Image: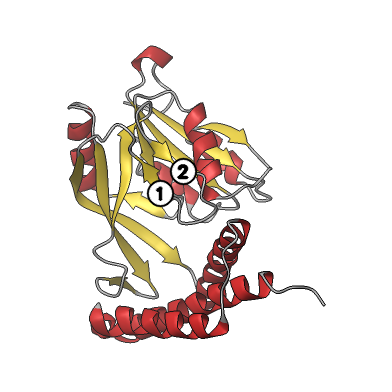
Amino acid sequence: MGANSEPEDQVLLSAVLIVKNESDKLAECLESLYFADEILVLDSGSTDDTCDIAHRYGARVAVELEWQGFGVQRQRAQSLARGHWILCIDADERVTVPLRQSIVQAINGDDAVYEVNRLSWCFGRFMRHTDMYPDWIPRLYPRAKAGFDDTRVHERLQNPQKLPVRRLDGDLLHYVYDSVRHLVSKSALYSEQWAIARAEQGRKGSLLSACLHGLACFVRMYVLRRGFLDGGQGFLIALVMSHATFVKYADLWVRTRTAP
């Protein structure tokens, strides 16, 4: 099977990505998706050559500049896909050979929601503890029977028909952070999107809640989930994530203050 090689009524698997300025990682991701019948890339306004790279790998490329959050963008991308099955993947992820083999086997069987185990590479090592592994996430599902909600960040796959949930063999490699600056800025973006979504729902926060949630995050990741076994990387991730947790609750508190 090759991307864009089949007519619409024969498209079995669509690999779907939402991207912005991913030129440094996209090519390797798309190389790992060669087995898909089509690759659908929805760009949200890249200023680098992300779209050119996607075209070179035979992807169908669309552009949607009105950003309403990750959930809505994934819904838009899914609506453009043609396959019976959707494989939702990000530009910083890679499908391993064992995972590819289990995906091919799954899509030739009955409809179900399939989870993949994501293995993240951070600062020189794969993270096998903290909250980062095991990291089972639903990524393969029938296009007409499931889809993501419209949450701005940390969107969730909805399974309204109660399809069976199964797990695929093989890891999905996740090259998540390029630098400490990338780690901090990415966590800040997610924290801001989280706070915006909660404020829109009428939720309120407090600085005490921010402190307690931040502390609980560090204890969970570094102690309870044995992040200390991942060496200095485990400590760094736990510390930055606990700070991000504090920031998102503090941001919510700031957004709900009454103007003088």
Would you call the spot at circle 2 few (<14 residues within 10 Å), some (14-19), or many (20 or more)?
Answer: some
The residue under label 2 is which amino acid type? Asp
Q: Is residue 1 left or right of residue 50?
A: left
Which image quadrant is residue 1 in?
A: top left
Q: Residue furthest right?
A: 260
Q: Secondary structure at mark 2?
A: loop
Residue 43 appears in the rendering: yes
Residue 35 appears in the rendering: no
Give the image location of residue 40, x and y in percent: 48, 33
Give the image location of residue 184, x and y in percent: 54, 75
Q: Which mark is residue 206?
A: none
| Of residues 5 and 249, the one drawn nearer to the viewer in this rendering | 249
Q: Secondary structure at mark 1?
A: loop
| Of residues 48 and 63, the one drawn nearer to the viewer in this rendering | 63
Q: Which mark is residue 156?
A: 1
Q: Residue under label 2, please give it.
A: 149
Q: Residue at x 18, y 43 (%)?
A: 166
Q: Is residue 211 above or below residue 35?
A: below
The residue under label 1 is which amino acid type? Arg
Give the image location of residue 39, x and y in percent: 44, 33
Q: Is residue 200 above or below residue 33?
A: below
- Coloring scheme of the render? secondary structure
Rounded to the nearest whole Å, what is the CA distance between mark 2 and mark 1?
6 Å
